[in-house]
Image (spheres, rainbow, N blue to C red):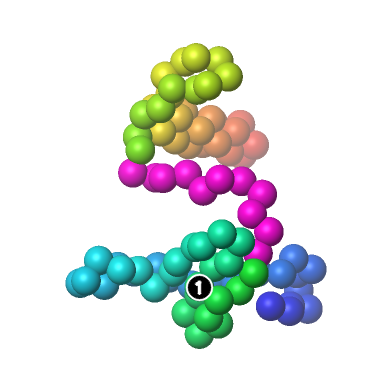
Amino acid sequence: FKSKKNIKNSYRTNKFVRKSGTTNIEIKDNKIKLPKLGWVKFSKSQKVKDLNIRKWKCPECGEVHDRDINASINILNEGLKMQKAS
């Protein structure tokens, strides 16, 4: 977890689904099961979103949002910023 280059603690691993349907990463309450580390406590600040849900209705503004369209808009905006910078 320690790095001389970055003060932020981090850990990266690949997630995969076994033939039985289980994954190598699990979340229960405020614990996460990671490969090689086992169960680790963590502070849950946000609810994890299900990435299989492509459209949802925002409870605050009432609009229907589409994850794919939002991603396309963000990618286009970043590309335009990069084009202006060069």
In the displayed structure, does residue 67 sit left or right of residue 36? left
Q: Secondary structure at mark 1?
A: strand
Instruction: Give percent across and percent down for residue 2.
Output: 73, 79
Residue type at mark 1? Lys
- Residue 21 covered by magenta stretch: no
Instruction: Give percent across and percent down for residue 64.
Output: 42, 19
Identify which residue, 64 or 29, lies in the foreground: 29
Identify which residue, 10 or 36, lies in the foreground: 36
Q: Which residues are magenta?
A: 42-52
* Residue 46 visible: yes
Q: Residue at x 44, y 69 (%)?
A: 25
Q: Residue at x 41, y 33 (%)?
A: 67
Q: Is residue 86 above or below residue 14?
A: above
Q: Residue at x 65, y 64 (%)?
A: 42
Instruction: Give percent across and percent down for residue 80.
Output: 54, 31
Q: Residues within 10 Å of mark 1 (few under 14, many from 20)?
A: some
In the displayed structure, does residue 58 sit left or right of residue 23? right
